[in-house]
Amino acid sequence: MTPTPTAPLKIGTRGSPLALAQAYETRARLMAALDAPEAAFEIVVIKTTGDRVLDRPLKEIGGKGLFTREIEDALLDGGIDIAVHSMKDMPTLQPDGLLLDTYLPREDPRDAFVTLDGRQLSDLEAGTVVGTSSLRRRAQLAHRRPDLNVVEFRGNVQTRMKKLADGVADATFLAMAGLNRLGMAEVPRAAIETADMLPAVAQGAIGIERRADDDGVAEMLALIHDRDTGLRLAAERAFLLTLDGSCETPIAGLAELDGDHLRLRGEVLRPDGSEVLAEAGEAPAAEGADLGRAVAQRLLDRAPEGFFDWRG
């Protein structure tokens, strides 16, 4: 039988409302799995570089590690016992001594298109201002609607909604998963089907990182790991790793599970949306990582000379 922590298990997280909601979900699942009281866990908020620097695009200040580095440092130093992450923020490789092998059940992976007046993307007139900080969404939008005006738009859900209200932009994108986890049914949104706009790799998934040598924590986390999400992310993250993806790379990918059969769709774009390459593949679920690498390699093989020069 897996023991209840003798001292409070410290759960590291960013401090945004969504990050906290994800940490609370992790705590609730551990409480249920271990039959443990809330007092057996402590939520530790850690501010990351990505949270502190909000006036510049992510690509100018360092990529995906911006939302994880300080949290992982605390995990390595023993300041926390586990770290809860939005998987779409996670680099494909973890620091030595850390493992990311626990995932909670995935939420809706689709993007949400948000306007205060309920207009959908197809309703927007030429020149309408759309705000997004995502290079992927920016490139996908430029490919589909080059007539729109896209501006930089960073911040958590609440910040972005205020920016809409203040007229900084007429529309923006959020993740359906975040809106669902926050219970924000009042936010006017239209879910964008994945056939129209493929989401970020691992969008909607929560990952829990731990120290590789902490067997007790590994035992606890195994009780709440969602197998299906793990199988899907094995394919998606292998796809991303093979493409050498980061926050500077417009890459989209989604794996879907049907029984023990996995289907992966992926695409890469030029940042200005002028060209999109897409591939798909299928494999037994247990071979997800191989599938991810194969789909990515087909995209690399198809890419014309100079396509990836912008990766830097």
Image: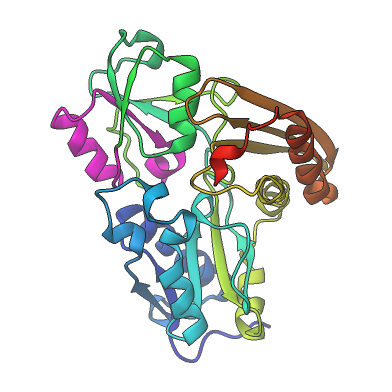
Q: Percent from the top left, x then y, of residue 246? A: 54, 49
Does 126 appear above or below 85? Answer: above
Answer whether residue 274 is visible to the viewer in this image. yes
Residue 218, position as x, y percentages in the image:
65, 77
For the image shown, how many numbered marks are present on the structure?
0
| 54 over 282 or under it: above or below | below
Q: Residue at x 53, y 44 (%)?
A: 203
Query: In the picture, residue 263 is in which quadrant?
Result: top right
Task: Single out the residue that lies furthest toward the left.
Answer: 166
> Is residue 181 toward the left or the right of residue 236 in the image?
left
Magenta residue span: 153-181
Asked where in the image residue 222 lies, by quadrant, the reply is bottom right
Q: Is residue 163 left or right of residue 177?
A: left
Quadrant the N terminus occupies: bottom right
| Closer to us: 240 or 255 | 240
Q: Is residue 153 left or right of residue 113?
A: left
Can residue 180 be found in the magenta stretch? yes
Image location of residue 193, percent across then percent down = 54, 23
Q: In the image, is residue 236 part of the stretch drawn in magenta?
A: no
Q: Nearer the viewer, residue 301 or 15?
A: 301
Quarter-wise, where is residue 209 in the image?
bottom right
**Percent coordinates x, y for residue 212 in the rendering:** 65, 79
Of the pair 309 and 84, the residue shown nearer to us: 309
Does 281 sit above or below residue 44? above
